[in-house]
Amino acid sequence: SAVISQKPSRDICQRGTSLTIQCQVDSQVTMMFWYRQQPGQSLTLIATANQGSEATYESGFVIDKFPISRPNLTFSTLTVSNMSPEDSSIYLCSVGALDGPSYEQYFGPGTRLTVT
Amino acid sequence: QKEVEQNSGPLSVPEGAIASLNCTYSDRGSQSFFWYRQYSGKSPELIMFIYSNGDKEDGRFTAQLNKASQYVSLLIRDSQPSDSATYLCAVNAGSNYQLIWGAGTKLIIKP
């Protein structure tokens, strides 16, 4: 399975500021995703990060608020812009790997964001 | 709308017993089914995936898939306190490899 790292692991930010989260994978992967997980809740997909093109956002998430970059097959960033306390959450990078007919999806360790 | 349903629990099981976790899904076209374990404060960890009807065993874990009834289950034999976690069921139905997630079942193994 791919080894995924995220930076920062946690941060406390002031309202109105922006934070960029980095996701690095130890091998080239086709699919990369960004999720959000509120405390005690399940996973919510923010967007699919597409290499070399604009990310594909899910309903309720927009590029102005959550700009995403994916310059190559091993790296992606998610920016949380103009933060409010409602953005406090865990943000997770995930990668999908194909192995013949099999498909598996793995998660990074997450970034715990608190907005004050 | 595609949905994945899980009982939120908590499900309490004595140590050494079999824990049975269930998941139903709405899209008959679903092809891949996954179980993740998530410890408190940690990210989800893939523990099992299954594509075909029937059982798939891996150590103490068995995944069971019944496409006709649209459910997938996870059995944990000889449950240990370290199995206490939230178990997330996920289903892939489309060609874009996105997963549809259940809300998770909290499992508590009592010594």
Image: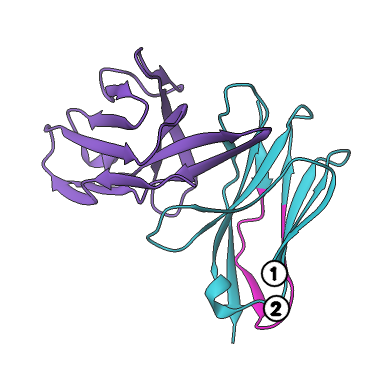
Q: Picture coordinates of residue B10 (x, y %)? A: 60, 66
Q: Which residues are magenta?
A: B6-22
Q: How many marks?
A: 2
Identify the residue position indicated by label 2 in the image. B78
The kind of secondary structure element at disc 1 is loop
Residue in the picture at 15% in, 32% down? A18
Going by the image, does A51 lie left or right of B11? left
Question: Label 1 to label 2, Cα distance in Å?
Answer: 7 Å
Secondary element type, mark 2: loop
The extreme top residue here reads: A53
- Picture coordinates of residue A42, whole percent (x, y): 50, 46
Palette colour of chain B: cyan
Q: Tell which circle, 1 or 2, labels the residue nearer the N-terminal end.
A: 1
| Amino acid type, mark 2 | Asp
* Residue A76: mark: none
In the rendered image, residue A87, in percent from the top left (x then y), is placed at 27, 38
